[in-house]
Every structure is written in C-alpha cells, then in structure tokens.
Image (cartoon, grey):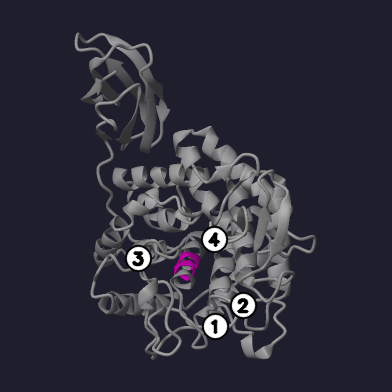
Amino acid sequence: MKNNSLFAQSNPDVNLKNFSSNEDVLDHADQKMRETLQELSYNPKLHPAHTDRETGQWVEEYLGRERWTSGFFAGSMWYLYKLTGDPFWREHAVQWTQDLESEAYNTSDHDTGFRIFNSFGNAYKIEEARYYFKTTLQGAATLAERYDPDIGAIKSWEWVGNYPVIIDNLMNLELLFWAAEVVGKDEWYDIALAHAETSLIHHLRADGSTYHVVDFTDSGIVNWKNTFQGYGAESVWARGQAWAVYGFTMIYRFTREKKFLDAARASAEYFIENLPEDFVPPYDFLEPEPSVRTKDASAAAIAASGLFELYTFTNNENYFNTAVEILGSLSSDAYMTKNSNISSILKRSTRQRGQGNLGTSYADYYFLESIVRYRELTNANFPVIQKESLFFLDQNYPNPFNNSTVIYYSIEEEGEVDLSIYNLAGRKVQTLENRFRSVGTYQIDFNASGLSSGVYLYRLKVNGRASTKKMILVE
C-alpha cells in the first residue's frame, strides 16, 4: 500500500538545524503521560482535552469520548510507543483506542478524523492489525455521510449557521484520502478533493491568511465568513493558520495538484513571517489587546509538524529550520511543564479568545508527532516493533447477507493474490481479486447480483498459502 508512513519523507541536508534535546523531552513526555494515567485512574473511558488554568489538571467535563479531542491521548500513546518501544505504552494505547470504536459511527460532526485517524489510524500504521484497519475504514464511511455535493464540502457543525465549514476540517480529509487509497474507493477520494477545493477557494485569503468559518446556503453560495475562535471576522487565528499549513500540505501529498502546494506555501509563509522571536505565536496574529494576547503552543506544534512535511516537497530549508526552532522553544522551560502540577506535556495553549495558558491534548499530540517526523527525516533509529501475523482471511460482514457484503484479508508477503468465490460443488463462480498486492490489509466489496441464494465458499491464495471461509447469501 502507498502512503502508509506518517508523511512524505526525504532526507535533509547536513547543514540544516538540529533538535538535540529530544531524549530529555521524551523522558518528560513519558513522565507526564504516566501521571495523566494515574489522574484518570487508568480508566480508558476518559480522554483528556484541556487542563484547568487554576489546578493544572484535566477538566472533568471534557473527558468524554464524543469530544473532538478524544483521539489525541490515544494517538500520543501510540507515538510514545513508536518512539520508545516501551510495551507499557502499547498496552494503554490499545485500551484507549478500543474505547473509541463507537466514535467510528458518530455522524454528529466532522471530527471523526480527529477521533478515529489519530487513534485507530496510528494504531494501524504501527501494528497493521485488521481490527484497526476495519474501524478506520468505518470512520471514513461515516465522515463521507456529511458531504453535500451541491456545496462541495463536508458539513462541520450543526449548532451554528446553515452549512458551516471550518478550516479545521482540512485535517479530517486525511482519513478519507488514506482510506480511499488503500481500498481503491474513488468516491471517498472525490469527496475529499472537492472539499479541499472548496476550502482553497473560500478559506484562504490573498495574503495567505485564513478564515476560521465559512457558512454556505443550500445551493453553495457563501452566507458569511468569520473567525469565531479569534479576535474578529477578519483576524488570523493562529491554530486555524496552522491547520492550513498542515492540511494543504497533506492534501498535496495525496493529490499532487500544484494549487494545494501553492496554498501550503502561502499559509506557511504567512505563519512564519508573523512569528515572534520565540517562534510560538499568539493565539491570534492580529489580537490588539495585550491582556488576552496569550500564546498558543498548540498552533506552534501543529505548524511544526506540517512544516516538516512541506520541506519534503519543496526543499525549502526555512521550513525545516523553522520547525526545529519551534521544537526548541516548545522544549524549553517556557513551554514544557517540568517541575509543575500541570498534567499536560506542554503549557501555554489557548482554546479561544480569553481562554489561554492551558495545557491541551492536541498540543501534546502534534508535539510528539513533530518529534517523530523530525527523527524520520534525520534517519534516527526507531525501536523494532513486533507486528501480528498478517496472513488472514476475515469472515465476511454482514453474514448472512442480501446481495452485498464486505471481505477483509491481510497478507504478510507481497505476491499474486487470488480471491475467488466457489459454490459447494467446488466450481468457481466469480473472481474478486487476481492481482499483485503489497504487504497489508485490504477490503473487497462483493456484489452477489446474479447468484442464487445459498451457501458459498470464498478462498484466498497467495504465495502457496490459502484460507477458505463460508458465506451465506439470502434473498
């Protein structure tokens, strides 16, 4: 399969900046994440979002799995497992990820990508287990339900406007692009592409800055544009700008359409040109009131991760070096929570205007992801992680079925794959797959139109190995 890595990788030149303190950073992250587990009483039904400004602990009312932030803590544990190889982090990442399975069916907003791709998606990329694969695909199917072809976008929320689309939604397109690629589902790719094009037209300003929210009429005409989480309608919310840097770069990875690379560059240039000396932006670049002009470590962490990938497509050293400078600042005492009672890894994030100086699970997540990307770019060694055996043929679902069903299979060696349907007399009635496949897990949609009801066999063969299961077709 393609694009199973975290991002498009290449090796930077030796004259680029170094991030030299990451071992100490990982020790700190390990300590704070363990303290969080204790704070949560090791209950995997609780998913941190942000800390209380006074107590430093995670706010209880925002620990639910339905929150947009619920996938970040599980994702952070998967990153710690990738970075350290410590089975402790795998054990707990599995538990917190499994608790989110129901969110793959949550159609209430666009945040399925944040909840499912950050948890199940990262779990699959690291372990390639079938369970994670299937749940990630279900998340993609759920997200696709919120798409309106008349508007050309996925609806973000239900509680404001008529058809609001937010800049954050770019991030959730990765779930659709990735899922479309691994199963060959053009519909999901087309939905993600259409949304990306709509956002490119309406969220990105001529100077490279971005709007937070664009609301549409039912026919796709713009009602209004605003920046709710920033200072005002025409302001530049730093986290939204970071979503654009990261999002348009990721979209280019899947589409290779130059207009998205140009959008990523424009967003990045605005972000970088307006950074202060410590490379961590205020929550809104245009906030005029000093009393609420709080820093946003989350915007810095998101942008750093996006800039590392943008470097791989452009060879622009400024992108790489800016990301390293950001990591350096975030790793300093000014932003790390060393020797404090704050439960997060990083401090000084801002949720929205007037709600600054907090720790957030998403700042921590993208900070760890930035370290992963930095290490991958610089050819650092990662611990060897044992993966489960990949040769497996799942029971079709649903079964029994009427007309259509889904079959998943996994292979641990590349080779010529044959997946065919047989009747009980052993006669082949249909070939579903007859092609070369790389190592991985795959989904096949089987339409039984033209076949009579009854019991059938389906058989997977690759490189001399075979597996057979029964399926029941009912009318």
Pointer 1 or 4: first along the chain: 4
Question: Circle 3 sits on which residue?
Answer: 77
Main SS of residues in magenta: helix
Question: Circle 2 sits on which residue?
Answer: 283
Q: Quadrant of the C terminus?
A: top left
| Vertical arrangement, residue 335 with respect to residue 37, above or below | below
Check residue 368 for magenta coloring: yes
The amino acid type, in three-letter code, at marker 3 is Met
C-alpha distance separating marks 4 and 2: 23 Å
Pointer 1 or 3: first along the chain: 3
Residue mark closest to the camera, 4 vs 2: 4
Question: Circle 4 sits on which residue?
Answer: 159
Asked whether residue 367 is in view, the answer is yes
Q: Locate residue 462 relative to residue 8 in the image: left or right.
A: left
User: Is disc 3 placed on a helix, strand or loop?
Assistant: helix
C-alpha distance separating marks 1 and 2: 8 Å
The amino acid type, in three-letter code, at marker 1 is Gly
| Vertical arrangement, residue 359 with respect to residue 149, above or below | below
State the residue lying farthest toward the right: 206
C-alpha distance separating marks 1 and 3: 25 Å
The disc placed on residue 338 is none
Residue mark closest to the camera, 3 vs 2: 2
Q: Residue at x 48, y 33 (%)?
A: 184
User: Is disc 4 placed on a helix, strand or loop?
Assistant: loop
C-alpha distance separating marks 3 and 2: 26 Å
Pointer 1 or 2: first along the chain: 2
User: Is disc 1 placed on a helix, strand or loop?
Assistant: loop
Pointer 4 or 2: first along the chain: 4
